[in-house]
Image (cartoon, helix red, strand yellow):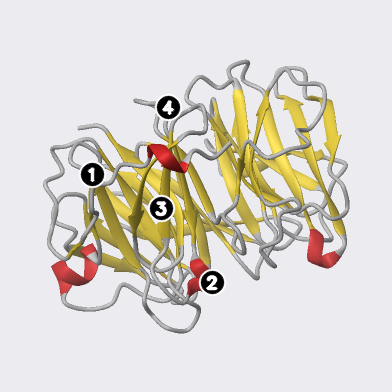
């Protein structure tokens, strides 16, 4: 469902300056190429269709780090998990100036605020969730889980549900954030869970699997009220879905099926109602020829869909902006390997 004829013919130059953030826009997390220490942030001014790149480097005159895994906005500060540099960098939301660096975290992945003063940090290559004291920006304790690679997290009430991107694990952990302890282990059909979203009915959707380690992907729906799994969808063995995303209404799921060879099969953005009885068989938006998508974000103000084409992590990422009908509206040149989007509304 690509309509290239509707793309605006307006140039999108690589602005190397700080943006005016009073406009509606989106922060891009550019992870960089592994080992090259070239991750950074970009900002697209959606009022004027202008992209600004290398925001951290411009503000701090140094590189941000190696593999920018994620960024989370907490109290007007971006907490940036830098996976291969084993640190969290905290920067001011408006100036992008570095405020502090949090060390002592092995391969941080994602950060989730679970209370006014506390955030959880998932990590790779170990079984630890780090508990961050936000006012002091220090790690006050860790939570041990039974498996490796705690990954994506989602809050419902006082509980944090944590996936485990471990091919030996078929467990999602329910952690009571009042005492930082595991309250329940939820067994799912698939292994290596890595994506989790909450829908309009307060149900959790869990994406699991690892194609390259022969773990077939599954999409599981879990009802926290009944504590039961009420649906499981099984992907084909040659499918490799990731980046599970929910729209703002909580009634439509999106995920990227990735084909690293750039072939047309199982390659693109897929869309699914939470009430569908089967997985989608065709992409809603096909990936560009000889390439693949790496990130997806949904703008809750316009319902526009943003996708990234990382171009093999050797050149600038192409960012595609689509209408909610899948019509291509605009495209931009961002940093290396854009992996996520943070939408800004004021």
The residue pinned by badge 1 equals: 49
Q: Tell me the element at label 1.
A: loop
Quadrant in which the C terminus appears: top left
- How far apart in space, not on screen, are marks 3 and 1 (Cα)? 12 Å
Dot 3 or dot 4: first in sequence order is 4
Q: Disc 4, disc 1: CB below 8 Å? A: no
> Which residue occupies the foreground of this view, 285 or 297?
285
| Residue 312 numbered tag | 2
Mark 4 or 1: in front is: 1
Dot 3 or dot 1: first in sequence order is 1
Q: How crowded is mark 1: few (under 14 residues within 10 Å), some or many (20 or more)?
A: some
| Residue 175 numbered tag | none
| Residue 303 numbered tag | 4
Q: Tell me the element at label 3.
A: strand
- How far apart in space, not on screen, are marks 3 and 4 (Cα)? 16 Å
Q: In this view, does 59 lie above or below 152?
A: below
Residue 88 locus on image (x, y percent): 38, 65
| Residue 319 numbered tag | 3
Q: In this view, does 326 lie above or below 101?
A: above
Quadrant in which the N terminus appears: top right
Dot 2 or dot 1: first in sequence order is 1
């Amino acid at each position: 469902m690509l309509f290239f004829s509707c793309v605006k013919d307006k140039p999108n130059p690589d602005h190397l300056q700080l943006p005016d953030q009073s406009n509606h826009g989106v922060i891009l997390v550019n992870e960089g190429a592994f080992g090259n220490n070239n991750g950074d942030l970009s900002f697209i001014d959606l009022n004027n269709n202008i992209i600004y790149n290398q925001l951290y480097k411009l503000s701090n005159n140094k590189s941000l780090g190696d593999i920018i895994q994620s960024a989370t906005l907490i109290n007007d500060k971006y907490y940036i998990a830098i996976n291969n540099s084993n640190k969290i960098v905290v920067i001011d939301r408006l100036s992008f100036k570095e405020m502090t660096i949090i060390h002592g975290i092995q391969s941080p992945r994602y950060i989730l605020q679970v209370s006014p003063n506390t955030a959880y940090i998932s990590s790779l290559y170990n079984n630890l969730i780090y508990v961050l004291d936000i006012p002091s920006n220090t790690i006050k304790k860790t939570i041990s889980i039974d498996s490796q690679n705690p990954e994506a997290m989602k809050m419902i009430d006082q509980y944090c549900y944590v996936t485990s991107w471990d091919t030996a694990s078929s467990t999602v952990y329910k952690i009571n954030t009042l005492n930082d302890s595991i309250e329940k282990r939820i067994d799912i059909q698939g292994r290596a869970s890595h994506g989790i979203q909450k829908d309009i009915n307060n149900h959790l959707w869990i994406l699991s699997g690892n194609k390259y380690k022969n773990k077939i992907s599954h999409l599981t729906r879990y009802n926290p009220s009944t504590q039961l799994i009420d649906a499981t969808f099984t992907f084909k063995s040659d499918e490799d879905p990731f980046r599970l995303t929910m729209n703002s209404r909580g009634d439509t799921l999106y995920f990227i099926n990735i084909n690293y060879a750039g072939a047309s099969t199982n390659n693109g953005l897929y869309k699914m109602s939470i009430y569908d009885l089967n997985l989608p068989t065709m992409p809603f938006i096909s990936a560009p020829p000889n390439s693949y998508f790496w990130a997806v974000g949904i703008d809750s103000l316009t319902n526009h869909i943003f996708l990234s084409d990382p171009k093999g992590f050797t050149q600038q990422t192409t960012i595609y902006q689509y209408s909610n009908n899948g019509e291509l509206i605009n495209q931009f040149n961002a940093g290396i390997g854009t992996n996520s989007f943070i939408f800004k509304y004021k």
